[in-house]
Image (cartoon, rainbow, N blue to C red):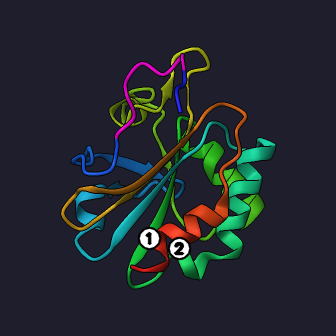
Amino acid sequence: MTVDTVAETPTVVGDTAPDFTLTDQTGAAVTLSEVVRDRHALLVFFPFAFSSICTGELLEISLNVDEFVNDHVSVYAISCDPRHAQAAWAAHEGYRFPLLSDFWPHGDVARSYGVFDQTSGTAVRGTFLVDQQMRVAWSLVNGPGEQRDIGVLHAAVKDL
């Protein structure tokens, strides 16, 4: 899939996952290299808190949270929204997983994964499964307006 407004080529299977530290909706710092010590990390980049497609996608993950947050994998949703917007959205929707803010420097982590849309200033729907060696084990990138197939995410984590 090609997204014309994405500046970099998306990270692909076999690549070393770019490390990062971002703040979640509660203000806690989350560092990828630390969380993958114990289990895989499913990174779910999304454009906007409170938007209909993003709400639907994260609701699907939330409804099936035991598949995405267990002894083998943890899920981290990432957007360029400020932490306080994510906190309000998480409280409103009842999300039980971290929402990470890539607000400042604006979109740095999305850029490092090649999923930052220069035109909108948001992340596109990039999804990356990072293993305990900091390698991308699986990835999927959807363009603006293209909803993720949650069944594909289920399949990606099923055999962990």
Residue located 77% across and 59% down the image: 92
- Give, as a three-letter code, the residue at label 1: Ser
Residue located 41% across and 74% down the image: 73
Q: Is residue 80 above or below residue 93?
A: above
Say what secondary structure mark 2 lies in: helix
Residue 29 position within the rendered picture, expressed as x and y whole percent measured from the top left = 35, 55
Q: Is residue 105 above or below residue 38?
A: above
Q: Quadrant of residue 112?
A: top left
Q: Could you tell me if the residues under marks 2 and 1 are in contact, i.e. CB atoms within 8 Å?
A: yes
Q: In this image, 142 relative to 129: left or right?
A: right
Q: Is residue 50 above or below residue 112?
A: below
Q: Residue furthest front?
A: 1
Cα gap from disc 2 to disc 1, whole angstroms: 6 Å
Q: Which mark is residue 41?
A: none
Q: Residue furthest right?
A: 52
Q: Which residues are magenta?
A: 4-11
Most common SS among magenta residues = loop
Residue located 54% across and 24% down the image: 3
Between residues 24 and 53, which one lies in front from this camera angle?
53
Magenta segment: does it hold 24? no
Q: Quadrant of residue 82?
A: top right
Q: Which residue in the protein does label 2 denote?
A: 68
Binning the other alpha carbons within 10 Å of mark 2 as few (below 14), some (14 to 19) or many (20 upward) gives many
- Give, as a three-letter code, the residue at label 2: Phe
Q: In this image, 69 relative to 87: left or right?
A: left
Q: Which residue in the protein does label 1 denote?
A: 74
Q: Is residue 46 above or below residue 9?
A: below
Say what secondary structure mark 1 lies in: strand
